[in-house]
Image: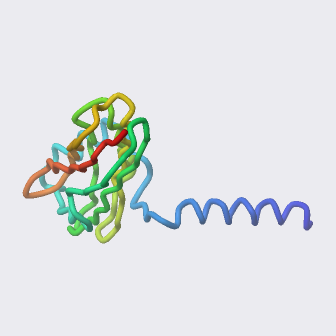
Amino acid sequence: MKTIFYPILIALAIVACNTADQKVAGPIMSDSEKDKAGRDTASYTTIQWLDSTSIKLGNVKKGEMVEVAFRFKNSGDKQLVITNVSAGCGCTVPEKPQQPYAPGDEGVIKAKFDSKNQHVGPHTKYVTVTANSKPNPIHQLNFMVEITE
């Protein structure tokens, strides 16, 4: 009995730890489900950016990879669906959340920036988030770095 019970207990603990940092309103949505939610203005909600939509990362050594995170909250009364996340250039790779967020739930838009092929000096990089949000479904996020030798 102990041999079966402990692996199950460990598996449950791992699952609980991996999901504790984000509440999920529903299952992962397909791209077509997200597109449909993005077009249905009756299901629009509001999004609140919990930190600044413009972040200063400071100095980054040329060749370093850095991650930036923009925290948000579904401040409306319907499910929030992030339909698209894109970057202004190939040096920045954003992550798109796959699940909807229930009213009151919080989430994070993350992006990784690779400074390897960038020139030394100041840079401003952009991440565009599209969601079923009102009054505007498009949100412009940015971060600034100073690339050094």
Question: Is residue 90 rendered to the left or right of residue 38?
Answer: right
* Location of residue 85 by image quarter: top left
Which quadrant of the figure contains the C terminus?
A: top left
Q: Position of residue 4 (x, y in %)?
A: 86, 60
For the point 71% across and 59% down, the residue is: 11
Q: Which of 50 and 132 lies nearest the eye of the viewer?
A: 50
Q: How many marks?
A: 0
Q: Position of residue 76 (x, y in %)?
A: 20, 67
Foreground pick, 28 / 71: 71
Of residue 92 and residue 42, the one placed in the foreground of this image is 92
> Is 57 placed left or right of 136 in the picture?
right
Residue drawn 26% across and 41% down? Answer: 84
- Where is 33 relative to 133, above or below? above
Task: Give the residue at x 26% y 65%.
Answer: 74
Q: Is residue 70 above or below residue 48?
A: above
Which x, y percent locates residue 89? Answer: 25, 31
- Looking at the image, residue 90 lies above or below residue 36: above
